[in-house]
Image (cartoon, coloured by chain):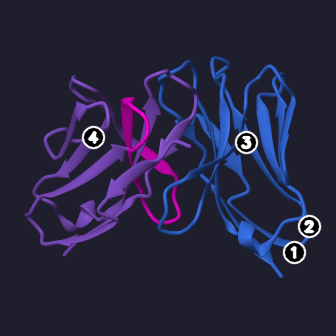
Chain colours: A purple, B blue
Amino acid sequence: GAVVSQHPSRVICKSGTSVKIECRSLDFQATTMFWYRQFPKQSLMLMATSNEGSKATYEQGVEKDKFLINHASLTLSTLTVTSAHPEDSSFYICSAQDVQGAYGYTFGSGTRLTVV
Amino acid sequence: QQQVKQSPQSLIVQKGGISIINCAYENTAFDYFPWYQQFPGKGPALLIAIRPDVSEKKEGRFTISFNKSAKQFSLHIMDSQPGDSATYFCAASMNTGNQFYFGTGTSLTVIP
């Protein structure tokens, strides 16, 4: 089945530094990838939708200059949290859809970001 | 505005019992309704999904019941097991390539 690899699974960084999270579709090509944020015991909140070769579409209230998304190829999207602060600490999850446009979305295993 | 409403927030069921989680939606343009299972520290995994042209779909111990007129759908877990203890999210989407709208999640605990 479709597999989405997300890396790293955990990262601790100092306040003010930047962190990059990678999301790769391993056995399919993904035209569209989604980035979510999840707080403890809460639902997934969509942050942005990235389409290969074009600018990401950010949800209302998400700072595009803080959460930089790049979808340079059909198998890789990256989320960079710039100038991270403790309030950015969260669980970030990506999901991908294949180019055939099938309804199934596959989620990555998530990245636990802790900013100290 | 919560596009998909999910209940209950938490659920405790004895081993062997039936777990039932309910979701409701307003947007009649939704045409795909998946359920996801999430274990702590992991991403959600697709459990089962249904489209509005059928009223029920069963896969093993998991069944989705769909009521189009009421705009409601539910997940039934038969013979619940401790290994089913996880958080379950319902979701809805419209058309191919569009985002999912997730419910608020249900924390299921199955006690031995």
| Bounds of the magenta segment | A26-45
Describe the element under mark 1 as helix, strand or loop.
strand
Cα separation, mark 4 vs mark 1, equals 42 Å
| Vertical comparison of B32 with B37: above or below | above
Tag of residue A77? 4
Q: Mark 2 belongs to which amino acid?
A: Gly
Q: Which residue is mark 2?
A: B17
The answer to whether residue B19 shows anywhere in this view is yes
Amino acid type, residue under disc 1 in the picture: Gln
Residue A45 pos. (x, y %): 43, 46
Q: Which residue is mark 3?
A: B23
2 and 3 marks on the same chain: yes
Residue B37 relative to residue A65: left or right: right
- Identify which residue is drawn at 48% across, 49% down: A44
In the foreground, A4 or B47? A4
Q: Is residue A15 left or right of residue A59?
A: left
Callout 1 touching callout 2 (CB < 8 Å): yes
Q: Name the residue located 22 percent from the left edge and 24 percent from the top edge.
A: A53
